[in-house]
Image (tube, helix red, strand yellow):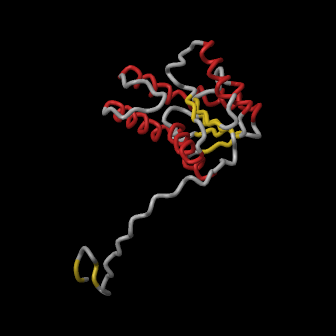
Amino acid sequence: MTPPARRIVLVGPPGSGKSYVAQRLSERFGVPWHDLNDHRLGDLRALQIAYQREVLAHPRWICEHVTLGPWRAIYQAADRIYLIQPRVCLRDARILMRHWQKLRGIPFKGHPPPRWPLLARVLRINHRYDRFIYPQLVNDLADFSRRVVRVRRNTDVLRDFGVFTPPARPARIRSLKRRPGRHPQRGRR
């Protein structure tokens, strides 16, 4: 099955659900998924350029990243750019959960091993994102405005591709019918 957009970029703050969405779309459509935040790339420009060429050589891909940074060519080649922007408290909870899971030995693609200084740094970036990074990112993405889709929830991206199935709602417990003239807490009137 082919996704409607052949080249997708997911951009947003730490904990916005970019990796979750990329993994689900990658599994569903068989498209390679690239984490441009990969700690192994570091700040080495030569490695970044080589990686960018490797990504662009494929006809279909999904990339995720926090900011535009040195990846402008990938953004230019993208069919659709999703800017995911959930609330800070939700992002904090996801970051803490991911750190706890990494401490328990559950690996995450592209994420470094758990370290407390790194957790503090990611939380600091998360809290500064809305105020400092997001306005600059929106300004940088102005060149690609026709391809940018802003969403508040990562599940909105999955819905766009028909991947999201809402969880089953638990059966509702019927309340006891009140008898006329009786108050449920006070007894008889």
Relative to the observer, which residue lies in front, 144 or 55? 55
Is 146 left, or right, of 26 in this rendering? right
Relative to the observer, which residue lies in front, 182 or 133? 133
Which part of the image, by quadrant, shows the C terminus? Answer: bottom left
Please name the residue shown 68% across and 43% down the image.
Answer: 149
Position of residue 2 measured from the top left corner of the image (x, y, whole percent)? 66, 48
Relative to the observer, which residue lies in front, 66 or 41? 41
Q: From this viewpoint, which residue is outermost toward the left?
A: 187
Position of residue 116 measured from the top left corner of the image (x, y, whole percent)? 35, 22
With respect to residue 182, does 41 lie above or below?
Answer: above
Q: Quadrant of residue 129?
A: top right
Position of residue 174 measured from the top left corner of the image (x, y, whole percent)? 35, 75
With respect to residue 177, does 13 lie above or below?
Answer: above
Please name the residue shown 69% across and 48% down the image.
Answer: 4
Is 181 left, or right, of 151 in this rendering? left
Q: Quadrant of residue 139?
A: top right
With respect to residue 182, does 54 lie above or below?
Answer: above
With respect to residue 166, does 60 lie above or below?
Answer: above
Q: What is the tally of numbered marks visible in this picture?
A: 0
Is 76 left, or right, of 33 in this rendering? right
Position of residue 77 measured from the top left corner of the image (x, y, whole percent)? 73, 32
